[in-house]
Image (cartoon, grey):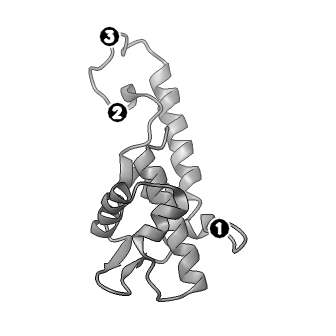
Amino acid sequence: MNLTRRTDFALRTLMYLGKSALENPGKPVPSAQIAQTFDIPLNHLIKIVNDLSRRGYIRSIRGPGGGVSLAIDPGELRLGYLIEDLQGPMQLHECVNAQGYCVIETICKLRSIFRDADAVQREFLNGHTLADIIPDSQSI
């Protein structure tokens, strides 16, 4: 599994908002501040922020003094769930979930190995939460 750039930027945004919530509870962070911190084009970050807001991970406050903040408890959000929600099922190869995709499907032993690997990866990532990846105060 490879993270898409969009998912990578979404994770960075959530980590940044988690850190901000610890340091300044209740204070929204301007999207431009996040974009500048991670060198992400602002128009691209705004699309990601809108998506995260629509999915219920963050809340957006418009106007002066506005910005974005976490809408969820970071300790409740499992990384595997989050990644799959943002970019779809984790899979090493597209044959894992496809029926009739492969001409050697009936004799291929890779599919079950890939399926098991996907399950291990999912279980591992779901063993960690957003709270586990929030940077300490020396970072960012």
| Quadrant location, the C terminus | bottom right
Task: Give the residue type at disc 1.
Answer: Pro
Q: Residue at x 29, y 65 (%)?
A: 50
Rate crowding at label 2 as few (under 14), some (14 to 19) or many (20 or more) other CA atoms within 10 Å.
few
Secondary structure category for the residue under label 2 = loop
- Residue 103 has which mark? 3
Say if residue 73 shows up in the picture.
yes
The image quadrant of residue 108 is top left
Q: Which residue is mark 2?
A: 97
Task: Give the residue type at disc 2.
Answer: Asn
Q: Residue at x 38, y 70 (%)?
A: 57
- Total number of numbered discs in the rendering: 3
Residue 125 at x, y = what percent?
56, 53
Task: Give the residue type at disc 3.
Answer: Val
Q: Nearer the viewer, mark 1 or mark 2?
A: 1
Q: Are marks 3 and 2 in contact (CB under 8 Å)?
A: no
Q: Which residue is mark 1?
A: 135
